[in-house]
Image (spheres, rainbow, N blue to C red):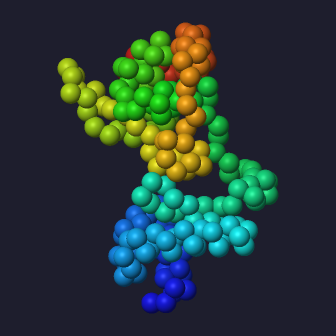
């Protein structure tokens, strides 16, 4: 295959997949060494940005995927406004932040930090694919360990957790105080419903 054909196969495979694909798997599919393929991917990314293409390649760890160009976000938002996902509540965002910065973490550990039960928030985050169970903690009861997913990275537009803003001690202390504030009524209702089951 020549360079144009390889680029065509990569774009077609990513389009059909609809999700991130392993760089190594793509390299193997087109018969190119991983290092050479990685260079080709970097060139493709640069070319697409230079052309101000609406569809770009982006890296997510050791995977690559298609994404829209941020330059056209306002237009896309207007076009697809009815389909934009509902935003996350404050308590769900708070839980997501704890998981992102402390992962892997158990639900009881999240509850201890927040000062309230987090069943509702964890279930919403799992439902949206932003977190997943990554194993069990080797303690009594073997609680599930939660961590963020590739969807979380895509949602934030970052390629790795290292790109998350650093937490300063004062911010962390302030966040801890915020955890002690009362939660939204909907979460309290969801917690009450869970306790009745």
Q: Please give the name of the residue rendered at 61% of the width and 29% of the height, measured from the top-left corner.
A: 89
Q: Position of residue 34 (x, y in %)?
A: 38, 71
Q: Position of residue 66 (x, y in %)?
A: 56, 64
Left or right of 6 on screen, residue 80:
right
Q: Please give the name of the residue rendered at 68% of the width and 51% of the height, measured from the top-left corner.
A: 83
Q: Quadrant of the C terminus?
A: top left
Say if 134 sits above or below 1 in the image.
above
Q: Please give the name of the residue rendered at 46% of the width and 69% of the height, measured from the top-left corner.
A: 38
Q: Position of residue 136 (x, y in %)?
A: 26, 33
Residue 74 versus residue 82: which sits nearer the camera?
Answer: 74
Say if 190 sits above or below 64 in the image.
above
Q: Please give the name of the residue rendered at 51% of the width and 31% of the height, measured from the top-left corner.
A: 96
Left or right of 134 on screen, residue 17:
right
**Residue 21 seen in this snapshot:** yes
Residue 57 versus residue 43: which sits nearer the camera?
Answer: 43
Left or right of 105 on screen, residue 155:
right
């Amino acid at each position: 295959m020549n360079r144009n054909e390889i680029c065509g196969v990569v774009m077609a495979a990513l389009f059909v997949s609809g999700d991130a694909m392993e760089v190594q798997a793509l390299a193997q599919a087109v018969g190119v060494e991983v290092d050479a393929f990685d260079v080709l991917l970097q060139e493709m990314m640069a070319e697409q940005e230079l052309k101000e293409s609406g569809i770009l390649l982006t890296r997510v760890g050791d995977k690559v995927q298609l994404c829209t160009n941020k330059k056209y976000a306002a237009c896309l938002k207007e076009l697809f406004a009815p389909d934009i996902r509902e935003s996350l509540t404050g308590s769900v965002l708070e839980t997501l932040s704890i998981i992102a910065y402390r992962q892997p973490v158990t639900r009881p550990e999240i509850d201890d930090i927040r000062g309230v039960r987090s069943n509702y928030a964890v279930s919403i985050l799992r439902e949206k694919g932003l977190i997943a169970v990554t194993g069990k903690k080797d303690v009594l009861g073997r609680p599930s360990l939660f961590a963020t997913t590739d969807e979380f990275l895509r949602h934030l537009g970052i390629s790795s957790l290292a790109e998350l803003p650093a937490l300063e001690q004062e911010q962390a202390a302030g966040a801890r105080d915020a955890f002690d504030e009362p939660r939204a009524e909907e979460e309290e209702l969801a917690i009450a419903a869970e306790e009745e089951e």
